[in-house]
């Protein structure tokens, strides 16, 4: 079965990685950033070697987000920047093919072992099974 494994984050986390810490997200040193990138690289390599890795990417900061919606009159509404009402955003993801929910849960637990600076929040990792088939049950309007 295929799964989407998502790591949550916030604009404050991205700010801390670029040198602007806060009380909830201390500044990351260059060594801490390199340790995180090395950890994620090793994880991706292991998942590739096991044949479970399909895709995975880190995403840019929420400040680079564009939200596209429709207003009450059916006109497009385009908003740049982070979502005002959302604290946590998708920071990165993997698409994995795993034999069981238990296996993908073990991988998600490993993601939580990623090194971070002392005092940094531990971002939640969300697992969602990917619906197989031709999009049955998907309503696009």
Image: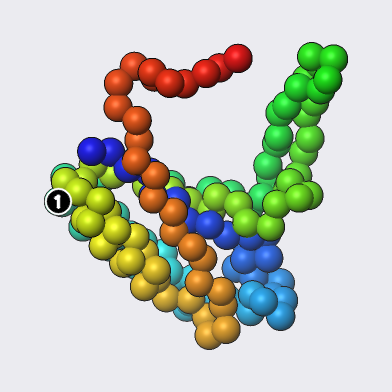
In percent of width and height, residue 112 lies at: 39, 68
Residue 79's quadrant in the figure?
A: top right
Residue at the far right in the pictured view: 73
Res. 8 visible in picture: yes
| 110 in relation to 59, above or below | below
| 106 in relation to 64, above or below | below
Q: Is residue 16 left or right of residue 5?
A: right
| 2 in relation to 107, above or below | above
* Disc 1 packing (10 Å; few <14; some 14–19; many ≥20): few
In percent of width and height, residue 123 lies at: 51, 65
Report which residue position mark 1 lands on: 50
Quadrant of the snapshot with the C terminus: top right
In-front residue for pair 8/53:
8
- Residue at 52% x, 80% y is 117
Q: Secondary structure at mark 1?
A: helix
Residue at the far front in the pictured view: 137
In percent of width and height, residue 126 lies at: 44, 54
């Amino acid at each position: 079965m295929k799964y989407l494994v998502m790591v949550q984050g916030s604009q404050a986390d991205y700010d801390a990685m670029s040198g602007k810490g806060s009380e909830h997200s201390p500044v990351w040193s260059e060594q801490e950033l390199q340790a995180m990138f090395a950890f994620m690289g090793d994880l991706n390599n292991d998942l590739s070697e096991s044949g479970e890795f399909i895709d995975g990417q880190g995403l840019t900061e929420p400040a680079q987000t564009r939200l596209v919606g429709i207003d009450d009159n059916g006109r497009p509404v385009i908003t740049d920047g982070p979502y005002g009402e959302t604290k946590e955003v998708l920071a990165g993801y993997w698409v994995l093919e795993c034999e069981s929910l238990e296996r993908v849960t073990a991988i998600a637990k490993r993601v939580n072992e990623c090194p971070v600076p002392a005092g940094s929040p531990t971002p939640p990792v969300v697992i969602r099974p990917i619906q197989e088939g031709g999009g049955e049950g998907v309503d696009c309007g």
